[in-house]
């Protein structure tokens, strides 16, 4: 199954996730994301905890709630708390056999992201070998875009620059459609790639595009990251 086919499948699947459960995980995700983007992490945690301890939440609801807590702490770079919440999310998610493959796939990908952030590339390589590509349809577009960017970085580290560029450009196309506010993350990686290959023109183009999206969505961290990458 090629990447374009995967994208179509996981896009179709994603529109159906969250049905039949107490909470609308997508609406809640947007709310928590909006809090985190302005630095209101305490509001995110309070909101999530209030729902976690409410009545009538399903195991799959709890999986999504703890996954959002994990993402909040990860944004704060509090990795011990992040990993603890990811483990709890996995525990509740696996209680629902209906969502077993989805949960296993998402948790594995998030553990890849954690090791990637730790710069433990040998561990990233090890975990990537466990990914069943046919199960990537269970990822939302944003997560899939980040996954593709990790592949790009791994290829870049191995000096497979042509494939790395293809990976980054694919990730960009996915995020443009589904989550454009996160495009600076990949344009920053593309900037590093073009700097490594001494393509100054493309490097500057990547910087300008990344900075445009960072400013357009007023995400200060991304603005700082783009300037830091340029220097």
Image (cartoon, helix red, strand yellow):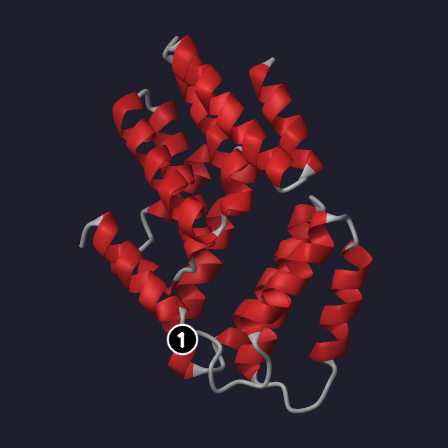
Give the secondary structure at mark 1: loop
Report the side of 36 relative to 87 (left or right).
right
Query: In this picture, is 25 found above or below 196?
Result: below
Question: Is 100 in front, or is 44?
Answer: 44
Residue farthest to the bottom? 56
Q: Is residue 24 above or below residue 31?
A: below
Q: Position of residue 225 (x, y in %)?
A: 63, 28
Position of 33 relative to 14 (above/below)? above
Residue 198 at what x, y percent from top left? 39, 8
Q: Is residue 225 found left or right of 155 in the rendered image?
A: right
* Residue 124 sits in quarter: top left
Image quarter for residue 28? Answer: bottom right
User: Residue 227's spot in the image, x, y percent?
Assistant: 63, 21
Rendered view: 139 above or below 114: below
Label 1, on which residue?
Answer: 16
Q: Position of residue 98 (x, y in %)?
A: 39, 82
């Amino acid at each position: 199954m090629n990447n374009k086919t995967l994208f179509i499948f996981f896009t179709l699947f994603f529109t159906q996730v969250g049905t039949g459960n107490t909470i609308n995980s997508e609406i809640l995700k947007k709310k928590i994301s909006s809090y985190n983007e302005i630095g209101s992490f305490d509001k995110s945690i309070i909101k999530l905890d209030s729902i976690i301890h409410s009545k009538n939440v399903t195991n799959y609801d709890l999986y999504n709630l703890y996954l959002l807590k994990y993402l909040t702490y990860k944004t704060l770079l509090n990795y011990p708390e992040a990993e603890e919440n990811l483990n709890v999310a996995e525990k509740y998610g696996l209680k629902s056999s209906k969502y077993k493959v989805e949960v296993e796939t998402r948790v594995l990908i998030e553990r890849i992201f954690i090791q990637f952030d730790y710069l433990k590339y040998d561990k990233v390589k090890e975990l990537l070998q466990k990914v069943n590509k046919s199960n990537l349809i269970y990822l939302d577009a944003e997560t899939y875009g980040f996954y593709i960017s990790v592949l790009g970085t791994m290829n870049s580290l191995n000096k497979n620059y042509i494939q790395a560029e293809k990976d980054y450009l694919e990730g960009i196309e996915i995020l443009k459609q589904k989550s454009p506010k996160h495009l600076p993350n990949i344009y920053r990686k593309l900037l590093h790639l073009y700097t490594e290959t001494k393509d100054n023109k493309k490097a500057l183009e990547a910087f300008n595009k990344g900075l445009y999206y960072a400013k357009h969505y007023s995400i200060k961290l991304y603005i700082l990251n783009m300037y830091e990458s340029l220097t």
